[in-house]
Amino acid sequence: MNDFDKLCFHVYSDGKRADIPFGTDVLKIYAMNSIAIVACIAGVRVLCLIVGDTHLHVVIYGTRKSAEVFRVLLKSRIARHYTINGMSDLLGDGFFLVCDPIQNREETMAKIIYTLRNSLDFSRQMPWEYRWGVGNLYFTQHLNVYGNRIGDLSYRKLCRLFHTEVKIPKEWLYDDSGMIMPASYVDYEFVERLFGSPRAFIAFLYVRKEDEQKMKEQLNARYLEERSIEDLRKIANKLCISTFGRVLRNTTIKNRIKVAAAMLNNHTATKSESLAKAVFLNMEDLTRLL
């Protein structure tokens, strides 16, 4: 973990959103498969992941460039699929992903455990029993991995089943529901070397509640900070049209301030230079008038 040409990154969507983009098994399978396929394209290793009804988390290993490629491709693949299939309303204001670099070995371990424990927020199962995660892969035997071999599919059937024209590794396996089995693409051996022993892994699982809450707050703050001006402007325009019947450029400064205030109140933005630019104001005016 001292190789700084390749680092670990935490990629995640908004954990506080009210929309439910992954509310069905079919949509969770699509998200899981998308993570596998995009990781293959971007050339990153997946270390850990979880998909819940409202959001997802992925910990990956790769270069800074490949991690950003992963973020961009995963975001666009999911958004495009929902648009093409008439499900854009499930994404609310849109689908956004943050890609945070992880600084050291200890933080990598903490982010992996945070991702695994995230299932406890929306499931009564233990993290290693939650289907849409990978807790069952670490420090266990992998002698009997059953599934259907992707290499046995025709190219046409592969494209139809996984919604991609990318050549997925032939040795990967998928189950009868059409989900690529995480054991095919998750580098659980890397994670095992990282923790060193089951004892250390279990010790990390028992984090203090206040530490976990602090991490959640930090991630939510980072998510809001990382939204681009373009993303914020799309949200602001939609809100402005629904509230005042016109786009931001054609409304008053007073209405722009109201839009900015509404975005702050519903936690879709933080008071920042980006928000000011998104609603066509300078930071001084935004600060003075809010």
Image (cartoon, grey):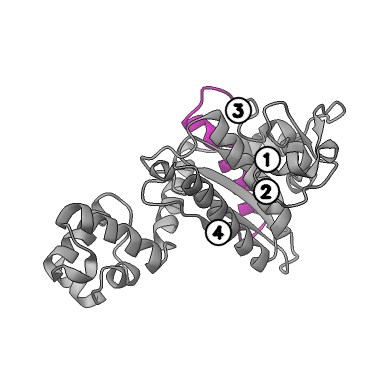
In the rendered image, which residue does mark 2 sit on? 164
Rendered view: 134 above or below 35 = above
In the rendered image, which residue does mark 4 sit on? 99
Q: Dividing the image into 4 quarters, which one contains the C terminus? A: bottom left
Q: Are marks 3 and 4 in contact (CB under 8 Å)?
A: no
Q: Dividing the image into 4 quarters, which one contains the N terminus? A: bottom right
What is the secondary structure assignment of the residue under circle 2? loop
In the rendered image, which residue does mark 3 sit on? 130
What is the secondary structure assignment of the residue under circle 3? loop
Q: Say left or right for 152 vs 217.
A: right
Circle 3 crowding by C-alpha within 10 Å: few under 14, some 14–19, many from 20: some
Image location of residue 45, percent across then percent down: 73, 52
In-front residue for pair 14/210? 14
In the rendered image, which residue does mark 1 sit on? 160
Give the amino acid type for the residue marked by disc 1 in the picture: Arg
Q: Are marks 3 and 1 in contact (CB under 8 Å)?
A: no
| Rendered residue at 42%/62% (across/down) | 227
Rendered view: 286 above or below 91 = below
Q: CA distance from mark 3 to mark 4?
A: 24 Å
Give the amino acid type for the residue marked by disc 2 in the picture: Thr
